[in-house]
Image (cartoon, rainbow, N blue to C red):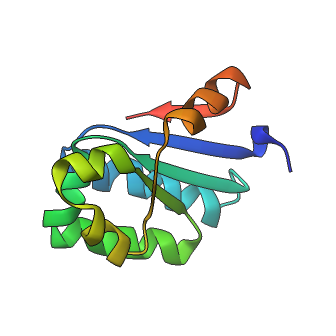
Amino acid sequence: MTERSHLFILWTNDNPITAEEMVFRYSVNSLLKGWWENVTVIIWGAPAKLVSEDKNIQEKIKEALSAGVCITACKRCTDNLGVTEILEKLNIEVKYTGETLTGILKNEGKLLTI
């Protein structure tokens, strides 16, 4: 599998409408409809706090994970916001993501920034 069949969505906007109507709708449909082989949502910054507090967004996370979307969050962000354990309990992979993002960009990966 090549990076070109893998879509990465960098989610930095904490607007819940944007999360529901774009991030989750597109990521899930991308897999269900075969638009992409793999989809990874990277939570970076303010959305980490949104995820920790918003039960509706937590349900969208569960639905996305069930559909096969990989969801990861920036550990530095979650630590700074005090939400690491909450996101981990939601089965979100929490890790340092600076190198990951740099690799995507340097290798011309498919990156959608929200």
Vertical side of 4 occupied by 67: above or below: below
Outermost residue toward the left in this view: 53
The residue under the point 27% across, 40% down is 45
Quadrant for the C terminus in the image: top left
The residue under the point 13% across, 65% down is 53
Residue 69 falls in which quadrant of the image?
A: bottom right
Q: Nearer the viewer, residue 9 or 33?
A: 9
In the rendering, at what x and y percent does residue 12 appear? 31, 37
Vertical side of 55 occupied by 84: above or below: above
Vertical side of 27 occupied by 93: above or below: below
Q: Nearer the viewer, residue 11 or 35?
A: 11
Outermost residue toward the right in this view: 1
In the rendering, at what x and y percent does residue 23 appear? 39, 49
Residue 86 falls in which quadrant of the image?
A: bottom left
Q: Is residue 55 left or right of residue 33?
A: left
Q: Is residue 72 left or right of residue 18?
A: right
Q: Is residue 43 left or right of residue 81?
A: right
Q: How many marks?
A: 0
Q: Is residue 55 left or right of residue 68?
A: left
The residue under the point 60% across, 53% down is 39
The residue under the point 59% across, 27% down is 102
In the rendering, at what x and y percent does residue 32 appear? 62, 66
In the rendering, at what x and y percent does residue 79 appear? 26, 52
Q: Nearer the viewer, residue 80 or 2?
A: 80
